[in-house]
Amino acid sequence: MNTYYDPADLKKFGDIGEFEPKLAKKFFDWYGDVFAEGALTAREKSLIALAVSHAIQCPYCIDAYSVDSLEKGCDEAQMMEAVHVAAAIRGGASLVHGVQMMNKVKKLTM
Amino acid sequence: MKSLKAQHSELSYSENQLRLLNGVEGHTGKFTPFSERLKETGLFPLRPSGIQIFQMNLGKMCNQVCKHCHVDAGPDRKEIMTQETMLQCLEALDGTDVPIVDLTGGAPELNPNFRWFVESLSDLGKHIIDRCNLTIILANKKYHGLPDFFAMHKIEVVASLPYYSKRRTDGQRGNGVFEKSIQALKMLNEAGYGKEGTGLKLNLVFNPSGAFLPPDQKELEKDFKKELKLHFGIEFNNLLVITNLPISRFLDYLIASENYDEYMEKLVNAYNPAAAMNVMCRDTISIGWDGFLYDCDFNQMLDLKVENQVPQHIQDFDLAALNNRNIILNQHCYGCTAGSGSSCGGATT
């Protein structure tokens, strides 16, 4: 596949330690703990991850957490609501900077 | 939608499915043989733990044509168990203390001798399970009384409902199935099923509606109970979560949707020795509509009869020999041993 993103590369994520095993191990141990059942359920974490995947626009993460959400029992409505939450935060994050623009404009204009 | 058989699909032949599962058709070949994985965990050859369940396929005829159906059942399928075969089953059962008879199909209720057979099993004192697709109860006036009939014989009803939403259910089982299923569940509740104190057991079955593994059974059961009660006032006992095995129409779907390799890989990677310990073929014998004996319903659909050292037909039923057999294995067995495991009774771990 002649693109920057090859779906098959997702399966190679675990090999990332080949060039730096110690840090990779730390990352994967931490990652595992982050997604373990805790104060939040594993399903809630999966939906958060799905939303974040969209916010950071990571195709690997979108694939991985679409499957994971289904396998945690989520339905399409829940998954799409999570994506809207990500979109709303992204949109809001741009829009809230409009205040800065307004401040600047007001300072510069009579 | 038609059955694979009616479409004259190559996958309607079990030998073609097996060839594909074993990697001859350009797919796989790279997957470790299931028997090798069992050897690694000391479970090979796989042996019965003692037959507790007689699972009988009363016929492949069904009023639905579900996309994932491993039986390739549908209205065009005419294979139906005869009364003669049923009598042979009754005779075999009468000579054993096998406690449970699990009736499946197709829609088992479409067998013209269904009620007579249930009454006969009831007289033998067997615990009877009916695997009901729910919509059959509404398919024709003559089936409207099924909930009361089930209740009269204290039959355990195991009903398929892939999800508590219309989209997912209709997507897997056909348009309109969700609404009819809800109506049928209400009728079962009215007959006392799923209600505390009645002793009438109503279990629902979840199959993933696609190429992914099922969620945790207990977690999903909570969701099903909450949603079905909240929106429809429906109650039930337990949710059984079943993994889709890569055979028949689900195999056809996997190939057509280009999910086959990935799904197989998922099953293989999720192999769980603890689940393998408790696979259903260890305590179940599966009887085909024509009386032949199989280790499980999936082997039945792949025409993999019990090993030929033991009598292979119900007319020669020999419980001792069956309890002493080696179970026939193939690559589809990964489906029952992935993750939390899968059986007709739900997760195995």
Image (spheres, coloured by chain):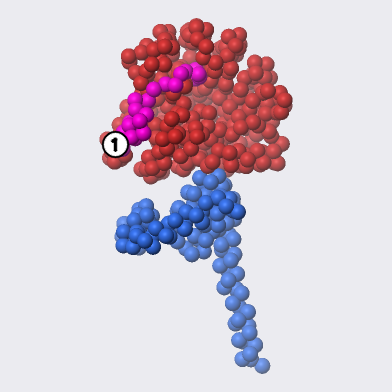
Q: Which residues are magenta?
A: B32-55
Q: Which chain is blue?
A: A
Report the front residue among B232 and B263: B263
Label 1 element class: loop
Mark 1 closeness class: few <14, some 14–19, many ≥20 residues within 10 Å: some
Q: Is residue B160 above or below residue A88?
A: above
The number of callouts visible is 1
Inspect the image, locate mark 1, and give the three-letter code of the amino acid beneath it: Gly
B12 within the magenta span: no
- Horizontal side of residue B12 vs A39, given as left or right: left
- Horizontal side of residue B176 vs A18, given as left or right: right
Report the front residue among B164 and B346: B346
User: Can the viewer see residue A88 in this picture?
Assistant: yes
Q: Residue B280 appears at what percent x and percent y? A: 46, 26
Protein chain holding label 1: B
Report the front residue among B236 and B141: B236
Q: Is residue B113 above or below residue B178?
A: above
Residue at 52% from the left image edge and 51% from the top image edge = A36
Q: Pick out the residue farthest to the bottom.
A: A110
User: Can the viewer see residue B329 in this picture?
Assistant: no
Q: Residue A41 appears at what percent x and percent y? A: 58, 50
- Horizontal side of residue B173 vs B334, given as left or right: right
Q: Residue B169 appears at what percent x and percent y? A: 57, 38
Report the front residue among B151 and B170: B151
B45 within the magenta span: yes
Q: Which chain is red?
A: B
Please give the residue where the numbered disc 1 appears in the rendered image.
B23
Q: Residue B12 appears at what percent x and percent y? A: 38, 28
Residue at 41% from the left image edge and 35% from the top image edge = B273
